[in-house]
Amino acid sequence: MSIINLDYISANPLLVEVQEAMIEAIKTNYGNPSSPHRLGDQATMALDRARESVARLINAASPGEIVFTSSGSESINHAIKGVAWAKASKGRHIVTSNVEHNAVLKSVRRLRQMDYQITSVPVDGYGLVNPDDVAKAITDDTILVSIMHSNNEIGTIEPIKEIAQITKERKVIFHTDAVSSVGVVPIDVQELGVDLLSFSANQFYGPSGVGGLYIRRGTGLWSLIDGGAQENNKRAGTENLIGIIGAGVAADLAYRDMDKRVRHSRRLKERLVKGLKEKIEDIHINGHPEISLPNLVSVSIKYIEGESIVLMLDEEGIVVSTRSACASGSLRASHVLVSIDMDFADAQGTLVLAFGQEISESDIDRFLDVLVQVVATLRNMSPLYRQAKGS
Amino acid sequence: MSIINLDYISANPLLVEVQEAMIEAIKTNYGNPSSPHRLGDQATMALDRARESVARLINAASPGEIVFTSSGSESINHAIKGVAWAKASKGRHIVTSNVEHNAVLKSVRRLRQMDYQITSVPVDGYGLVNPDDVAKAITDDTILVSIMHSNNEIGTIEPIKEIAQITKERKVIFHTDAVSSVGVVPIDVQELGVDLLSFSANQFYGPSGVGGLYIRRGTGLWSLIDGGAQENNKRAGTENLIGIIGAGVAADLAYRDMDKRVRHSRRLKERLVKGLKEKIEDIHINGHPEISLPNLVSVSIKYIEGESIVLMLDEEGIVVSTRSACASGSLRASHVLVSIDMDFADAQGTLVLAFGQEISESDIDRFLDVLVQVVATLRNMSPLYRQAKGS
């Protein structure tokens, strides 16, 4: 049975070209980029090439503005805690939103334990932050605003450019978690006007274990990992060179194929949303209908539970997610769905469907066919459903 | 020209078995261990296997005491800062030594900026810490002692077991940076009695980009990277699974071959030290002659500079290091050599020679032959040498 993977938000599969580059790197057996001899030189060249590829993908002014990390989560921790610590003498107030990824939520929670104050702005029913709310939340004590570029559970894309204009005026550092966006939609850090931007290679067919942090030149923040002089003195530790080489190739392909990928994703998303609406009653498509990621659909299916849907789809070789992969293990309703005012019971039946290049229209059709059966089976067993339908 | 790599301290080459396992992992295209479906299950199993292998290598009581990180440096930052933050209400004093790796030195320097007090104990001429000095340095305010297991520049192995007895009595958490030791000499965390131990897979023929932190059950410390529930809720971020799988295989081989490796290294070290002493005058072998790593020799060659030696050896296909790879980029004399009271001028001509399984006795002989010529050439050009020899 071939597997249909609609859980691209957890991790993308590696592209063949990325696999080949990583295998080549393994066989090359590079040295340590920090070594001042031939093995080090080869490694440094490979590292520089990857950095240039990633810089181009997000249009950084210079490759030196890219710091490779081990994950999107590390990048986010580095950005938020790094600014908070470096600017503590200036102020201890941070503005963020109610729908951020756990890496942001838990980083600011840590900072709260270190006597920082956090203001979390709300979102509307689509999950959109209102830039005016950010403006109002900023005080003389504010040192950082962190608002995500796109939401990893419902796909809504936030008004980053508008918020950046506000933070620039108010002289506050602006970080955006763009993990779900980089490689999926065009990202131009200069056009956006952000100071810090986090991303992860596994969202664009690169390996897990490689993230990146864009640090606009001149942005003052502390390192998260202190030690050696790696990454322009911003992130110590011998580099994950094999992974970074894979990430560089993945960035090259994302840059080259961006338009094609977006078109392909849009076509699938339209087909998927249309199919869901036509074939299953009592559902809700979450997130903004237009200002959103092309490769992600969040659907809440009333009267049944996501966990059961995942398991039954799994038996049919279809892989989906019920919530942000990084949040699994927690049993509470998703904070994102709570923030867009979804009813707790309805939130339980929410699937996050994320897809990529390898997924075809016939995969979407097969998924829809199987889902219709799964939903019918589960609803037949659901007291909630029978009660609602009065049978 | 075949290359002789005597810079194993910067990074070990990958063993063939490690390469094969990583290539297999790349082709398998694992999912995200956090996903509650079949792709996640396969990934989780692979991750668990690697964790068991590493736990066995250092004799942890349970695999759950191992946290995978992205490098030895991250492990060290996690251990030191994590304890400092978690125990701030108990005290703000940390004891460390003068010869620690940069990741330790710079972590405690950061903590100083956060109003922690640091006491750094001295070492003797061999680089040995005196446990009595540690005992004297501990105050009621001390929350952490961090002393390295072995020194990455001179190879001296510190009296960790004795220090652990002191920290246990005084109820202070004890971290040891064992990056240069794990996989090189037998390490038993239970016998050592440490609470936290940092290591890196690239020191035992695993990939760069994978480190680990042993956290004895019950040791309270904060995470460095907050977010998702990965690594038993101790380190967020999607795992570098390909690298971790490689690290697991490397750990298995290190466990299996430990005796053989130690014997091989000892034989080479004896030959190397004997050859250096016989063939080159005015040199000094640094570190303890017996209580030291079997795979590392630090030699200071008077009247000439390490950088020139490295470059000339490089031309002959021989790769060595002048100082800790992670410290390169800094132009100052090694703090380790300063701490063992070496003359500044003598320290300039210091080579760190570290070798592994692939190095043969004939490699050592060839290195010695070439080095003799290089030293003669450089000394002939050296005003210092001519002055000293009165010619």
Image (tube, coloured by chain):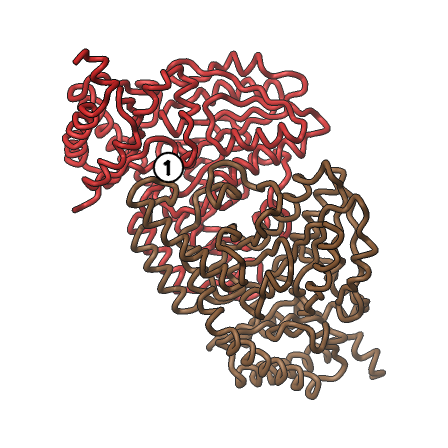
Chain colours: A red, B brown
Q: Which amino acid is tagged 1?
A: Gly
Residue at horizontal 34 percent and vertical 60 percent from the top:
B23
**From what the image shows, is residue A34 above or below residue B293?**
above
- Left or right of residue A371, residue A205 in this image: right
Please indicate, yes or no, whether residue A233 appears anywhere in the rendered image: no
Tell me the quarter of the picture where residue B378 sits: bottom right
Please indicate, yes or no, whether residue B326 appears anywhere in the rendered image: yes
- Left or right of residue B379, residue A112 in this image: left
Q: Secondary structure at mark 1?
A: loop
Residue at horizontal 24 percent and vertical 39 percent from the top:
A314
Q: Residue furthest right?
A: B390
Q: Residue furthest bottom?
A: B278
For disc 1, the chain is: A
From the top left corner, tell me how far across and down residue A30 is, in percent. 47, 62
From the top left corner, tell me how far across and down residue B186 is, in percent. 57, 69
Tell me the quarter of the picture where residue A263 sits: top left
Please rate how many residues cluster around mark 1, counting C-alpha atoms within 10 Å: few if below 14, some from 14 to 19, many from 20: many
**From what the image shows, is residue B334 above or below residue A298?**
below
Residue at horizontal 26 percent and vertical 40 percent from the top:
A5
Q: Nearer the viewer, residue B171 or A72?
A: B171
Residue at horizontal 15 percent and vertical 29 percent from the top:
A373
- Left or right of residue A296, residue B364 in this image: right
From the top left corner, tell me how far across and down residue A184 is, in percent. 35, 34
Q: Nearer the viewer, residue A180 or A73?
A: A73
Which residue position is annotated with label 1? A183
From the top left corner, tell me how far across and down residue A369 is, in percent. 14, 30
User: Is the C terminus of chain B in the top left, top right, bottom left or bottom right quadrant?
Assistant: bottom right
